[in-house]
Image: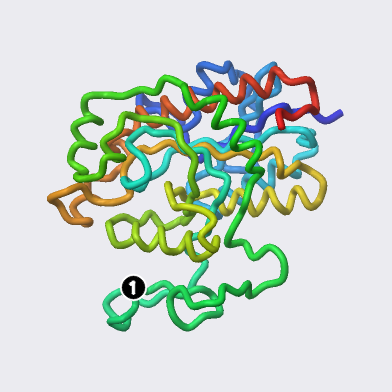
Amino acid sequence: MPIPIRVVLITAFEPDAGPVPGELRHWIDRNHLDTVLPFPQGYRDLRFNEQGVLAITTGVGAARAAASVMALGLDPRFDLTYAFILINGIAGIDPVRGSLASAVWCDTVVDGSFAHEIDAREIPQEWPDGFVPIGKSIPYEQPLAHRFNGDDGIVFRLNSKLSEWAFELSRDTELLDTPAMAERRAQFVPSEVANRKPYVLRGAELSSTTFWHGHLLSQRARNWVNYQTEDTATYTITGMEDTGILQSLRFLADAGHIDFDRVLILRTASNFDQQRTGITAAESLAETKVARYSAYLPALENAHRVGNVVVQALLALPDGDSPV
């Protein structure tokens, strides 16, 4: 008989060893994900505990993430029919929307790379950027038209009631703050939002395997999310895997393997998506390596603190029930 799974935890990376944790380490240590299940068809072996929490590390980027999640969904060892699925990881945040180590519940995810593109050095002077929607001739050309029938793989909308429930449940969670983070966010002037202590919020995610950075690309992200969602969502945070994950989950739901209405995304801000005052985008990007993210460790801590509040509430429900 397949093992009934209560919660699937999806993370992108975790070092095999060493003092610096990845996205799964706190979950392994604190939620006793002690059972290791071989998973040769995916990026890393799976982790499992007696409460029915199954954790997967997909690998960084949409391609690895999509393949790993599809492999998990089709694995005959597990019954995911009533599993809640929490995508939990770090990301870059827009300083006009949130602060370092803040936690963002995302119920809208927009693909940021499914587009035509012209090098910025060759775009017409009147264009705001070099990104053109598929099937269009100029940036943000109206009307918005889907080139493909049905789900076009660009905009994914989750169960907003479930996301709202998770946000309300976790919004008062005490988040880790540090003097180093306070110093860094003070350099993002004059944004009052960027200078806030970490907090829990809601917002849309732009998902792209390209790790982009800078003021201009951040503005492009705002414009792109507004355009693709017809101004129904606001760009807040960026990730690298989630459209790949969500596309696999959508296909798995269509085949009856999972319930797409039980999917949640929580991203915490390890860094800002652009340079601070006084330096260039290139200089800022050179600083932005995993071990040097200005809020890397606090973001991992807060991802677990906020996510675990929701996971424990989900585990307390009777089998098959939903909080919404």
Q: Which residue is mark 1?
A: 128
Residue at the far right: name it.
1
Residue at the far left: name it.
278
At x 36%, y 22%, the residue is 176
Q: Nearer the viewer, residue 318 or 121?
A: 318
Q: Position of residue 170 (x, y in %)?
A: 52, 25
Does residue 145 appear left or right of residue 253 in this picture?
left
Q: Position of residue 163 (x, y in %)?
A: 60, 37
SS assignment at label 1: loop
Does residue 52 appear left or right of residue 308 in this picture?
right
Does residue 147 appear left or right of residue 59 in this picture?
right
Q: Place residue 198 in its image quadrant.
A: top left
Does residue 217 appear left or right of residue 201 in this picture?
left
Callout 1 amino acid: Pro
At x 43%, y 27%, the residue is 302
Q: Nearer the viewer, residue 17 or 226?
A: 226
Q: Position of residue 11 (x, y in %)?
A: 53, 37
At x 57%, y 38%, the residue is 87
Image quarter (top left, top right, bottom left or bottom right) of the N terminus = top right
The answer, for residue 41, to whether it is visible in the render is: no
Count of numbered labels shown in the rendering: 1
Q: Position of residue 95 (x, y in %)?
A: 31, 45
Say if 66 sits above or below 45 in the image: below
Q: Place residue 298 in its image quadrant.
A: top left
Give the class, few, some or many, for how many residues have Cα within 10 Å of label 1's Cα (few <14, many ≥20). some
